[in-house]
Image: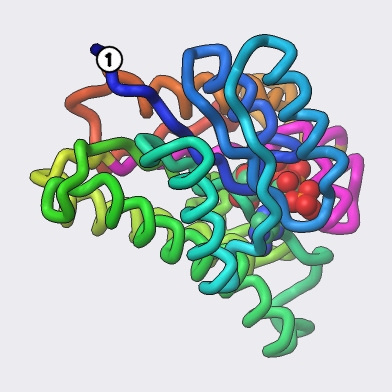
Amino acid sequence: MDIQKIALVTGSGRGIGAATALTLGRLGYAVCVNYRNNRRAAEAVVDQLHSEGVNAIAVAADVSQEKEVYELFHRVDHDLGRITALVNNAGILMPQCRLDEMDAQRINHLLISNITGYFLCCREAVKRMSARHGGDGGGIVNVSSVAARTGSPGEYIDYAATKGAIDTLTRGLASEVAAEGIRVNAVRPGFIYTDMHASGGEPNRIERLKSSIPMRRGGKPEEVAEAIAWLLSEAASYTTGSFIDLAGGR
Ligand code: NAP
């Protein structure tokens, strides 16, 4: 009998996470839709999954908080079963500014949201997937950003640096658990049409930058979700510690 595929997608009430939750549900995963504040959005994703016959739950948890991550994973254990796929997607952006205008409060808020949360969720996933802990293996995909390569000068170097840390986490963890049945990969999107650019203070950012993207357009959340789904699939069975850039050629 096939093992039931169970996915947790952090920050999946909206944007790339929501598209990923829907894509994985259509591929036969039971799905946990995690969110931080926007319950209505998360429940809409779950309603859509239910209407398509997919087993799905919405769970509120701030992934930067250790206790909430612990409770989130226990909800998945209890309601869906032992996780086979983790998509670390929940992330934030702060209003655009130069480095010489940043204060420690802003920087630390980004660090715990975008880095600590990914580490904590990886830890809980490894404890459930690793052969070392009696698990049956699994896949982790970290949502990084092309900002890890470009550094986002004049916009948000702090955000870009958190994504650089995620690339390093991906490389290190992939090697650490490769022999334990877990593959760890990352996607690096750029210029995807979501609410995130409004959080950075420029809702129309992609329109401003479009002409500098080789493909001359922004990307859709679904285009990122497809790459995540492939990295988690058996088709990618020899792929770990790898990155797929989804940024129209940038
Ligand atoms: P988005 O539309 O702003 O959605 C962010 C989602 O993350 C929301 O569901 C939000 O929950 C959730 N979230 C934020 N902080 C959280 C926390 N501490 N705990 C739990 N959930 C949290 O963002 P997006 O554009 O889809 O971005 C998703 C990921 O892709 C991020 O890691 C981002 O850095 C990365 N990325 C995006 C782009 C882009 O162009 N959009 C480019 C490169 C990388 P609520 O709905 O409850 O607020």
Which secondary structure, mark 1? loop
Q: Around disc 1, counting alpha carbons within 10 Å, would you say few (fewer than 14), some (14 to 19), or many (20 or more)?
A: few
The quarter in which the C terminus is drawn is: top right
With 222 as the anchor, is 176 left or right in this view? left
| Residue name at image x 80 percent, y 70 percent | 97
Q: Residue 34 appears at what percent x and percent y?
A: 64, 46
Q: For the view shown, which residue lies furthest in the bottom direction?
A: 104
**Count of picture labels:** 1
The residue type indicated by label 1 comes to Asp
Q: For the view shown, which residue lies furthest in the front direction?
A: 78
Does residue 188 show up? no
Give the magenta range: 184-207
Q: How is the image coloured?
A: rainbow
Vertical arrangement, residue 53 with respect to residue 78, above or below: above
| Residue name at image x 70 percent, y 54 percent | 60
Q: Residue 9 appears at what percent x and percent y?
A: 56, 40
Does residue 216 show up? yes
| Residue name at image x 29 percent, y 36 percent | 138
* Quarter of the view holding residue 224: top right
| Residue name at image x 20 percent, y 37 percent | 136
Q: Residue 172 appears at what percent x and percent y?
A: 24, 58
Q: Is residue 178 magenta?
A: no
**Camera-nearest residue between 212 and 5:** 5
Dot 1 beta carbon under 8 Å from ligand 1: no
Location of mark 1 (residue): 2
Q: Residue 114 appears at what percent x and percent y?
A: 58, 63
The quarter in which the N terminus is drawn is: top left
With 250 as the anchor, is 244 left or right in this view? left
With 80 as the anchor, is 1 left or right in this view? left
